Amino acid sequence: MARGGQRGRLPPAGERGGDPRPRVGPSSRRSGWLRDSTSPAGHASRRRGRYARPGDRWHPERVRRRPRRRGSSSRDGGRHSRPPRQGHGRRAGSGRPLAGDRRVKETLRPLAERYGSALEAFVTGGGEEARSRGYEIGRTAVADHVGLLEIAELHHEVLETVMRRTPARSGPYLAAASQFLGEVLSPFEMSLRGFQEANGRLTDLNSSLERQNALLAETARSEREAHEARKRAESQLIQSEKLAALGLLVAGVAHEVNNPLAFVLGNMAVIARDLGFVRDACTLFRRGDAVIREHAPALAAEIAALDARIDLSHTIAGLESNLARSLEGLDRIRQIVIDLHDFARHEEAPCEAVDVNQGVELTVRLVRGKAEKKGVTLEAACAPLPTVTCHGAKINQLILNLLVNAIDACEPGGHVEIRTRDVEDAILIEVADTGCGIIPGIRSKIFDPFFTTKPFGQGMGLGLAISHSIVEAHGGAIDVESSPGQGTQFRVRLPLGPASPPA
């Protein structure tokens, strides 16, 4: 076929050098069916000796001869002799079809079973019949996507067979056949390219969907964490409200207890005074024992019997001792009530200058009973401190939380110590214990709300979280040092300057 888009036309015989056989031109190569020298089909063509190069004129003399075996001759009539060709593709002296013809028919047999007689009519026929049969095959093959690769591999065989069987005047039909064969594969190549492009788009779409799924999973995880954080915040708010309500209750109870306590303390003071009078009277009576025995022997005998029965001197001494201990206990109750009242003061009170050591001593008195009950010694070592502008009630709550945790971490026989000292423009509060320590894996979680290592029912996991929030609200810092099995030390640093009101 000629270049320039004139498909199916061949140059005149004069331009073809007088060779009446059709020329396979560049248009056939463009169709993808006549392979060039770099394609597998091109190598196969050279191995079979069909053409020297793509686009060369077809000529019988270009068929490569088979190598002769030793001792054979082209004239000896042996089986390797090659008699000259005759017309229609047969050799002189031979009535058999060429081996290439048999190969084409054998290879085309499976295709003939698919497409019936259309393929055979295309190969052996000519003119309009061949063209119509060819297009019939092409439509069926394109519709089925079946047989296209086989037709492509047989392209050069089909053309050469038709060339040998077709007179020179059928060249235009052969050109049309070559054009058709190129057009047969074109829809398949386009379909294959379309499949590849669609596959690429599907791959991109899958990648995009995977990214979207990952983003959705991350969003869901973030929303779940936010929901859990909101629930924790709500629980903490409820707990804070409970603590605030409890503080108000404690303040009310302290006020109510303080009134009868003051009455009891007043009465005990009166009893102690009157008991002193009784003791003095007994002392005077003892001085007059001799006078009574001398002037009233009967009365002296009764007094001696009563003294022997009740041991008046020992009874008076015991009453004085019991009264002293009772007064001491009442004074302790009074101090506890005062401490509860101070501890439960309204948290929205403005910041004021506070002596932290007083808060430490107050809190130590509150928890000493808990420490003694568990068999843990509690010691306070407070160095002189400057006043700190802060919320005294919240600092007391901070100290209480640290001391309670330290006592709970100790076994019987353990030791807890709280120390205070002045450092530059801040103060340090250190609470150390000889308890079980903190595992390194959970050290970063101890300030999280509701995180606790205590048995169920013995803690809500809010003590350290509240302590951390109190320290941050005062512009301070809290850190922890711990070794498993060797104890823990919390260190709180509070600035001396005024702090913003805690949230």
Image: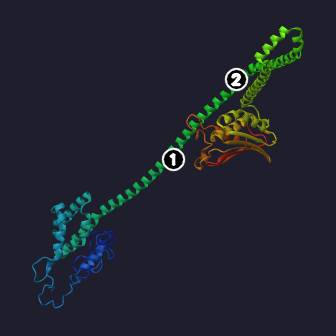
Q: Residues within 10 Å of mark 2 (few under 14, many from 20)?
A: some
The secondary structure type at the circle numbered 2 is helix
Q: Nearer the viewer, mark 2 or mark 1?
A: 2
Quarter of the picture holding the C terminus: top right
Q: Tell which of 407 and 445 is nearer to you.
A: 407
Q: Tell which of 32 and 216 is nearer to you.
A: 216
Residue 168: percent from the left, percent from the top? 19, 76
Name the image quarter holding residue 409. Answer: top right
> What is the CA distance from the residue labelled 2 to the residue labelled 1?
51 Å
Would residue 50 be visible to someone looking at this image? no
Q: Earlier in the sequence, mark 2 or mark 1?
A: 1
Residue 114: percent from the left, percent from the top? 18, 60
Residue 98: percent from the left, percent from the top? 15, 77
Picture residue at 61% right of the left edge, 35% below the top: 236
Picture residue at 81% right of the left edge, 39% below the top: 387
Q: Amino acid at mark 2?
A: Val
**Disc ID at residue 218:** 1
**Disc ID at residue 140:** none
Q: Residues within 10 Å of mark 1 (few under 14, many from 20)?
A: few
Q: According to the image, label 2 marks what residue?
A: 253
